Amino acid sequence: MAEKANTVEDLHLQNLTKSFGDFVAVDDLTLTIPAGSFFALLGASGCGKTTTLRMVAGLEDPTEGSIRIGDRDITRLRAFERPVNTVFQSYALFPHLDIFENVAFGLRRRGIKDVKPAVEQMLELVELGPMARRKPAQLSGGQQQRVAVARALINRPEVLLLDEPLGALDLKLRRQMQIELKRIQVDVGTTFVHVTHDQEEAMTMADTVAVMNAGRIEQLGHPADIYETPRTVFVANFLGQSNLIVGRRSGAAGDDTLVEAHGLTFAVPSQRCFAAGSDVIVGVRPEKITVLDAVDRDRVPESHNRVDGTVTDVSYTGVSTQYLVRSSWGQEFMVFEQNVIVGDRCDVGDPVVLHWAPSHTFGLDGAGS
Amino acid sequence: MVAVVPAAGRASSTPSAQKSSRTGYLLLFPGIAWLAVFFAIPFVTLFLTSLQKPIEGQSGRYAVGLEFGNYASAMAEYWPLFVRSFVYAGIATIIALVIAYPLAYFIAFRGGRWRSLLLVLVIAPSFASFLLRTYAWKTILADEGIITSTLNALHLLPDGRILNTGIAVVAGLTYNFLPFMILPLYAALEKIDPRLIEAAGDLYASPATAFRKVTWPLSMPGVVAGTLLTFIPAAGDYINAALLGSTGNRMIGNAIQINFIQFRDYPTASALSFVLMAIILVLVFTYIRRAGTEDLV
């Protein structure tokens, strides 16, 4: 399994659309998933991510558009004719077959006679060698999950599809399996397309994350890029938390766009400002904000964006302290502050100044909001 | 099992464990009593009757005896009817399976919101009496009926008729026991997760292979239950042969019935019943072992 499959090619989705009656589940999706990457489709339930996956697997016919692997059009191929395998959400292990036969299923269907070495090697990879003769029902959830991965991977698919594969596992096991899956992916070098609603899972595992909403991709990129520079309000709120201030474009200063809101002026780096018109939503992540006692307001760097407010809630979580601060116009800001200095905390009712660097600020299109 | 038995043995030596084991037997009592009254006693009576010998000069009266010869003479006279019964029942079971499987499959996987209605329709004919429905088949298969005349027009019937032939008897058996095939098949198919069939397709199985390797094996409990529930009553049935067949199509049920009711030859009738039961028992055990689903039935 160590040698990488050298036939792996990019997966292209072109104008892919799927409607169920009036409901458009996947809306004109165009996407290239690079060969050998770990790609996550992230979104809330009903956003079309599973439908996209099922179309790639051949379990659902696209209403429009095409699916290609390299130059080969697989849009009209039936599921069993595609070089694609799926790890199902419910695992869908065959209850009447033992683990060995479950894993051997794909090889046998392709007429491979001597399946033993490959199956044993695969079971070794997922550390289930001794379980070969057990039935799926005799395995724990985590073990079943690994059988499902082994059963799909043994066929050396060009693309492995994972449909919420860790959804049924408890938190600790899920973390463990995330690392495991990532290790396997690096080992075999196959393209993994992973569908999940768990943003943390998507961020820890994937090289590229596509955030889906209402059948469309809202934003696509490296997890860190998406987190640091969300381009839409949906992404800013779905991936982590954001403080968003509705304002209007009021000018520019150097590389920064100036936004006026509630009598204050905020600076947003122009290349991080994605507003088309004059309505701009200024955003900042809670951990980028520093809380200062109002009496220390002189210590705020001149260039920083700032908001005056009153602490309304303090929750100490050990690693960090989470503040809720009500601004003069009544909006509550969320702030995460690392507990670097013992005893340096604000209390409920304290007047404070929130400030953050313009480089940590992002600007979103506020039209229609 | 090995580990459990010694532990239980030790436990029963304490007074409280003894008491709880007595409670266990007490709880078993209603079940055992039911079995005794409705199964064991009739069974023993039937067996004893089969060994009785006739009382000289008193037709229809028998005395307690050990006439094992009753079995020999009954078998000598009626063995062809045994063979015919099992052949008819076997053919009817196979035809019923062939008809029922696609139907049950359709209801389970494609029935959608019509499922319950379709199932009621399967059972609905049973609301009419068994006898009545069999009489209806007399009309359907009658010599001047549509089916017979159509097939005759096409020269497909060697004897020129269906009624009063083995075909009619098998058709009647198939029809009458069809619901007993459909319902267990439906129950088994309905439990199959459609995602398993998707998974098989994902793993390079064509629809036909997916059926052979996934759907069919997973529906085996239903196939076994359905074939048994059809075969056993069909093998012992006498109404279909009596109404739809001729004297040449008599089944073992007819022989038992005629010996009990008309000839009042109770020992012969009992012996035939006993042999029928024994053969069915042997067949069922061999069948279940072959099907390899002892744990599923």
Image (spheres, rainbow, N blue to C red):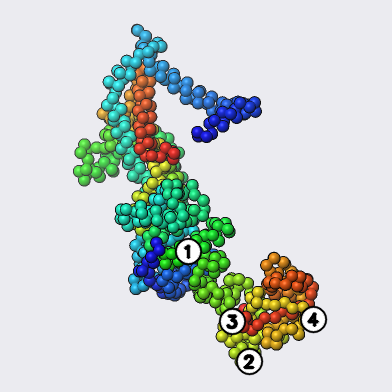
Q: Quadrant of the C terminus of chain A?
A: bottom right
Q: Quadrant of the N terminus of chain A?
A: bottom left
Q: Are marks 3 and 1 on the same chain?
A: yes
Q: Residue at x 35, y 65 (%)?
A: A77
Task: From the image, tell me which residue sits under label 1.
Answer: A183
Q: Position of residue B35 (x, y in %)?
A: 50, 26
- Residue A365 marker: 3
Q: Residue at x 63, y 27 (%)?
A: B14
Q: In the rendered structure, which disc, 4 or 1, sits on the residue that comes first in sequence? A: 1
Q: Looking at the image, do the residues carrying marks 2 and 1 touch, with CB atoms under 8 Å apart?
A: no
**Would residue A74 be found to the left or right of residue A286 on screen?**
left
Query: Of residues A281 and B127, which is closer to you in this image?
Result: A281
Q: Position of residue B138 (x, y in %)?
A: 32, 36
Query: Of residues A104 and A78, which is closer to you in this image?
Result: A104
**Which residue type does callout 4 highlight?**
Val
Disc 1 crowd, CA 10 A, few/some/many (<14, 14-19, 20+)? few
A361 in relation to B169, above or below: below
